[in-house]
Amino acid sequence: MYDWAHGLEDSIEGVTHSLCSLEYENHRPLYDWFLDQLGIYHPRQIEFARLNVTYTVMSKRRFLELVKGGCVNGFDDPRLPTLAGLRRRGYTPEAIHDFCDRIGIAKFDSTVDVQLLEHCLREDLNKRSARVMGVLRPLKIVIDNYPEGQVEELQAVNNPEDPAAGMRAVPFSRELYIEREDFMENPPKEFFRLTLGREVRLRYAYFVRCVSVEKDAAGEPAVLHCTYDPATRGGDAPDGRKVKATLHWVSAPHALAAEVRLYDHLFTKENPDDVPEGGTWLENINPKSLEVLPGARVEPSLAAAKPGDRVQFERLGYFCVDKDSAPGTLVFNRTVTLKDPWAKIQKGQKPAQPQQAKKPTGK
C-alpha cells in the first residue's frame, strides 16, 4: 500500500523528481509499475545516500524522541540540525548551500565532520557580520585617573572585510566591564592578559594598568582599579612601548543587559550510536550542550537589534539575536566560535574522507 500511495501522491502533486534515500531503490520498480498501469503523470524517483554529520543525529524519529523526552526545546532548538533549528542558531542559507556543494551527493552512506559545516559557516559570517563588543561574564574596571562624568566616543570598525560597512561610535567612560577570564591575580607564564601591575590595550581605546583589586565576600575579584595613559588613545603608545594583549570591553553606564545562550554539540561522541552493548544513543547526550549566561553586557549599538540579526562579538564568536528577545531584553544564541579547527586540518594534513557505510539491502 505504501508503494501504491507513494507514486500516486507524487503524481497528483505534480512532483518532478521524487528524491528518496537508498532503501527505496528496491521499491522503484513497483513505484514505476503502478504509475505505468494507471496511465497517469509519471514522476522520476531518484535515490541517494543519507547525510550523517558527527556529533548529531539526522533522523526525524530521533528528533521526535529528543523533543518528547525534553532533551531539547522543540523542533527549532538551535542544537538540532533541522532547518528551523539552524536558522534560529544563526546559520545562513549560503553557508548551508556551500556545505552541500562541497560534500556532493553519494550512493553510499557517509558521515561528514561537523567541523566542515562550521568552517563553511565561519567563511560566510566573516564576510557579512558586523563586529561589536560584548562581555559574557562581566568584571568591572574603574579607571581611577579618568575624569568622573566624562564620556568619549571612540570610532570602531564595523567589518574589516567590508570597507563599505563604515564605522560606529562606541562610548568610553570611567567604569567599564571586561571578561572575567581576562584577569588573573596569579597567572601562569603563558597568560598575557590583565594582572596586577601589567599593562594591556583596550580595543580602540587606551593602555590601562591594573593597580589594585577589590574582592567580594567569597574572595573573588569584584572590581579592578586601573590607571590609563591618555597619550595612548587609539591603541598605540607614542614612546613605542608594546603590550602583549588587547581586550574587548563595554562602558558600564551605557552597556545593554543581555542573556547569552552558549550552544555546543548535542552529543559527546562523534557517533551517537557508539555505546556499550545494551546501551542507548541517548546516553551520549551532552549535559553541557547549553549554558545560559543571564548577566551579559553588550555595547549600546545593539539597542535596535531584531531577531535573526547576526553579529560577531569580537574575540568571542558569532551570535544571532533569538526570537525570545523582547524590548529591553536581548537574547543572543552563539552560532559558532571563532576558532576554526578545520582550517588547521586543511593546513597541516589532508582532511579525512567521509566514512563509507555498506550499501543498504532494503530489508
Image: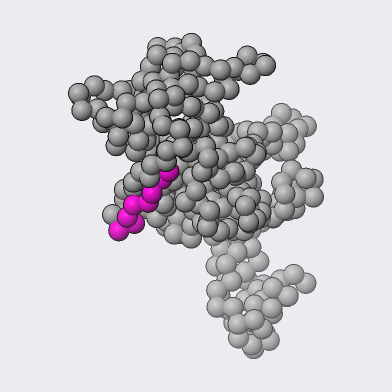
Q: Residue at x 57, y 32 (%)?
A: 137
- Quick one: quadrant of the C terminus? bottom right
**In the image, residue 241 above or below residue 152:** above
Asked whether 357 falls inside the magenta stretch, the response is no
Q: Position of residue 46 (x, y in %)?
A: 55, 67
Q: Is residue 177 left or right of residue 158?
A: right
Q: Is residue 134 visible in this depiction of the protein?
A: yes
Q: Residue at x 78, y 32 (%)?
A: 278
Q: Nearer the viewer, residue 128 or 270?
A: 128
Q: Nearer the viewer, residue 209 or 351?
A: 209
**In the image, residue 288 above or below residue 28:** above
Magenta portion: prevailing SS class: strand
Q: Is residue 49 visible in this depiction of the protein?
A: no
> Looking at this rendering, what residue extends furthest in the bottom direction?
39
Magenta stretch in the rendered image: 164-172
Q: Is residue 243 left or right of residue 14?
A: left
Question: How is the model colour-coded?
Answer: one colour
> Looking at this rendering, what residue extends furthest in the right direction?
68
Q: Nearer the viewer, residue 302 or 251?
A: 251
Q: Position of residue 100 (x, y in %)?
A: 46, 56
Q: Is residue 49 left or right of residue 239?
A: right
Q: Position of residue 178 (x, y in %)?
A: 49, 31
Q: Residue at x 62, y 43 (%)?
A: 259
Q: Residue at x 36, y 20 (%)?
A: 199
Q: How many marks?
A: 0
> Looking at this rendering, what residue extends furthest in the left direction?
239
